[in-house]
Amino acid sequence: MITKNKFRNYFYSLICLVAFSSFFMVGLSADKSGEINNFGVYAFTDVNVVPMDEERILENHTVIVRDGRISSVAPSGDIEIPENAEQIDGSDKYLMPGLTEMHGHIPGSDNPQYVEDVLFLYISNGVTTVRNMAGNPYHIELRDKVAEGEVTGPTIFAATPWLSSNSVSGPEDAERAVREYKEAGFDHMKMGSLPQDTYLAVAEASQEIGLPFAGHIPEGVGLVNALEAGQKSIDHYDRYVEFLVPDDAGWDGSNPGFFGSAVVHLADASRISEAVERTIEAGTWNVPTLSLVEHLASEVPAEEMAEWPEMKYMPADVVDGWVNSKRDFQARDDFQPEAANRLVEIRQILTKELHDSGAPIALGSDAPQFFNVPGFSIHHELEMMVATGLSPYEVLVTGTKNPAIYYDTPDEFGTVEENRRADLILLNQNPLQDIANVSDRAGVMVRGEWWPEEKIQERLNQIANN
């Protein structure tokens, strides 16, 4: 019997490609491009549509889904429902696009059961697309199986293994690795810790062959160099705090701490505007992952966080690891309450100023990580982003329409419009009134496959009891 506790610390390891047992086999599938799955015809009737093309509600509409695509969106009185359609009553409900987790982690191939569970945890919370970060060759196979309809899961964008000094030996080796990753079929590279010359070699090769690089900024590279090098996204606001430290603050540039926590007391918030301007000029995206820091900085004891309801879906040793990590962080000299709280504050201000200035932001929570359970964590992230001063609609844009723009496929997903992929969430209440309503689901459709809430709960109960 496969147990969950084989998984610990999976995403920091490079895992060999091994056999995979699939989950929820389905019937007809699309071609290998993975654009659609044939799950039949559905009609969401008399529903309030939240199209996310702009801030509005289309009241009393009917949405027809055919072969994994939205085929019609029209007022209920103006549309003919196909005879073979399965009708889903949307009266007094709200239909919005599925969410994208732009910084997620999917387990490796050594534990197929855990893979199945994690994929479903995303779906169960309305996360219908995941940009996987820090992957391995197995995730290419998994991405394609999901796309072909052989495995139930969110649409996956697959990252390379973590690029660091442990995986490449220098600039020449890094250039070779970039080309091999492109040939292997990865969607993007995950940046880790690299010397500046190796990082710049990766950036040059990336630009040449069209394989984007994203994630962390190495300590020796810094924000300005990363922006100038064309990094596609900066995750966790990496190196922004260091940029905010003035040259005359007395810091020698060493040991910045956890995302700048060791020098956050030197940060000058008035420099945020310059950081934002440089970000916009570079066209670089940010994936804030506010919950990553806020969960560690929270005064809620680790043991209490471990009792959150969603923790029952995670392996016990993973949750224990999070408890120990929080204890370790709170014992660090650079993460005492004053520094931790200031770090949270700076990240909140940065989020608001980036958004208000028009810098591109995409929703991501970094899950599973530090009390972030896949799928569930995206709802914590939504609430934290609203707490920075953004409206529910503005935050939802970062998790629906914006990711499609990030991938240069605005006509593929992220809005409720004709010909879009049928990734949808049916809600019991209006998400534009209260962001918490996004978790009050009546069901989720992923790639044209309908999961009513009762079926979702049945599967979640199975995961909890594994």
Image (cartoon, helix red, strand yellow):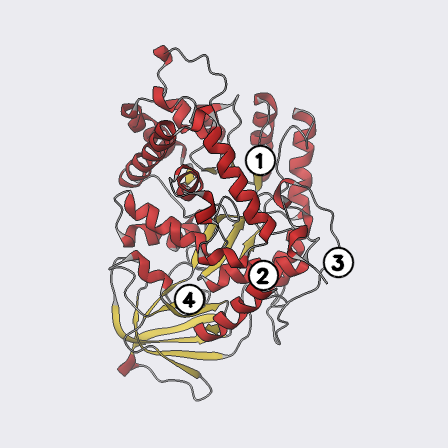
Percent x, y for residue 296? 44, 39
Q: Decide if residue 111 is on the left or right side of residue 304.
A: right
Of tags 3 and 1, which is closer to the observer?
A: 3
Circle 2 sits in a helix, a strand or a loop, which is it? helix
C-alpha distance separating marks 2 and 3: 17 Å
Q: Which mark is residue 206?
A: 1
Q: CA distance from mark 4 to mark 3?
A: 31 Å
Q: Where's the C terminus, which quadrant?
A: bottom right
Q: Earlier in the sequence, mark 1 or mark 2?
A: 2
Taking the image as shown, residue 407 lies to the left or right of residue 63, namely right
Q: Nearer the viewer, residue 438 or 225?
A: 438
- The residue pinned by badge 4 equals 424
The residue at 32%/30% (across/down) is 277
Q: Earlier in the sequence, mark 4 or mark 3?
A: 3
Disc number at residue 117? 2
Observer-side mark, 4 or 3, equals 3
Mark 3 crowdedness (10 Å alpha carbons): few <14, some 14-19, many ≥20 = few
Q: For marks 4 and 2, give the one nearer the viewer.
A: 2
Q: Disc 2, disc 3: CB below 8 Å?
A: no
- Judged from the image, the secondary structure of the residue bearing numbered disc 4 is strand
Q: Which residue is mark 3?
A: 19
Residue 284 in the image: state x and y as whole percent: 42, 36
Residue 189's place in the image compared with 69, above or below, is above
Q: Are marks 1 and 4 in contact (CB under 8 Å)?
A: no
Secondary structure beneath label 3: loop
Image coordinates of residue 291 in percent, x first then y, are 41, 44
Q: Earlier in the sequence, mark 2 or mark 3?
A: 3
Viewer-closest of 30 and 13: 13
